[in-house]
Image (tube, grey):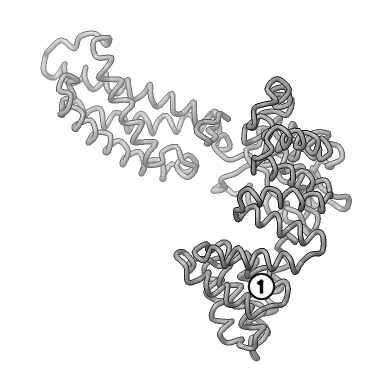
Amino acid sequence: MIRLFKHYIPHAVLLLGLIDLVLLYAAGEVAWQLRAQQLHIDGGSIGGRFGSLLAFALIVQTGMIAVGVYGAEALRSMRYAVARLLVAVSLGIIALSFVDFIFPGLDFWRSTLAYAMFLSIVALIFNRLVIGGILGAGAFRRRVLVLGAGPRAQRLRLLSERPESGFVIVGYVAMHDGQAVVEEAIARGAIHDLTRFVSNLGASEVVLALEERRNALPLKDLLRIKTAEAGKIPLEVLSARWQEQPGNADNVISYVRALLAQGQNARSVSVANSAVRSFPGSVTALTIAGDARLASGQFGAALEVYRRAALVRLTLPLVRRIANAYGRTRQDRAARELTRAYAAQHPLDRDAAILAAQYQAEGGDWKTAGVLALHAASLPGGERDPLAYSLLALSQVELGDPGGGLEDARAAYRLRRWGMAPTMALSEAMGAIKGQEVGAASLRNKLQHFPVLR
């Protein structure tokens, strides 16, 4: 695949687009020659119309891109492709008429545009029939690597074999020992470098199909794959930049983050310490130093560094880090007081109110949690925040108002049906109301499919 503006374009789609461009150019030339013969005039050489023909081809292809001719559905279905081609070419002809009005010298005659329109549609449809027959439909599908070899992976396999499927599975990786439903799955232990394995297969997506995801997510593997996919600078390059220019804050901080991403926590602490010494008043340097200590298990030291950063400037991301460090050092009361005080100082910050409500709820102060959640829901954008409604619903249930809690829980669930917090809130509210036990049990069963995050 080729990466363009954070989009990944398969080579087959790029080839199809280049052939389309040539065919559009040729259709414009054939239309001109055909009209010239009807008028009994000399058509002239093709070189004299290079600018006009190229403008025709580019404008029509721009319309094709805009209406989704190269989208997944149009590439898999000829019916979708024909419909979008008709719209794209029509829009292109309208745009060409406007261009001809602005630049009269391009010679876009209405008669030649009519011929070119018909010829372009025929040529583009024929191109898709030929290219699709040669390369096959799989060339335009997403290439997926499945992490898992159980029943879920087997269901993905059956889905990929359907004619209308938009993806093709290029491999399976058995992440755990045990009976594998997919026989051709490769054991994780047999793959030395999963990132290189993904690259060698040409996979554009990695899909988790684990049967039990609690405490079983391959986070380090996924992080390395994401780092490579996002086009981040290799660690060796960042190390060289840091050594060559240790006074550049961006180089140092990028290097520390790359070290943390690869699990080199001890090294990240050492480099972060040098960043703090070089930039003593930098909140970013202090924050990244705290992150390095937190990843290394030095929770008390991380808390101390975060506090130093807070003396310079206290922001909501820093409050989250300090509260997390408080929790790691068993200072839950301090975390609740910090988040509540920050929310009081920033009454218009919805995220701050929700964060404070979460910590009050964890501490059992449901009354304060409900007040904060209600305040968050009343702020701009709060009516679309499922977490605010979920916390409000849970607080009402805990305070003895399951009816009100059920109403807010349903509002949260409508906003995000596959959210963990709305599902939990709705299950708790329904479980507290007589006659709703079956629905509550169904939602609790749904909760088992969510990974444990904390």
Q: Residue at x 72, y 56 (%)?
A: 152
Q: Position of residue 55 (x, y in %)?
A: 28, 23
Give the quarter of the figure containing the C terminus.
bottom right
Whether residue 348 is situated above or below residue 23 in the rendered picture: below
Whether residue 311 is situated above or below residue 252 in the rendered picture: below
Q: Residue at x 12, y 12 (%)?
A: 41
Instruction: Using the image as rendered, state which of residue 42 and residue 312 is in the foreground.
Output: 312
Q: Position of residue 303 (x, y in %)?
A: 76, 53
Which residue of the protein is positioned furthest toward the bottom in this rendering?
434
Q: Position of residue 312 (x, y in %)?
A: 63, 48
Residue 202 location, quadrant: top right
Is residue 21 shown left or right of residue 357? left
Q: Position of residue 431 (x, y in %)?
A: 68, 83
CA neighbours of label 1 inside 10 A, class few (<14), some (14 to 19), many (20+): many
Residue that mark 1 sits on: 424
Whether residue 158 is situated above or below residue 238 in the rendered picture: below
Is residue 308 shown left or right of residue 331? left
Identify the amino acid type marked 1.
Answer: Met
Whether residue 5 is situated above or below residue 205 in the rendered picture: above
Give the quarter of the figure containing the N terminus.
top right
Instruction: Using the image as rendered, state which of residue 135 and residue 72 is in the foreground.
Output: 72
Instruction: Using the image as rendered, state which of residue 276 and residue 358 is in the foreground.
Output: 276
Secondary structure type for disc 1: helix
Instruction: Using the image as rendered, state which of residue 205 and residue 140 is in the foreground.
Output: 205
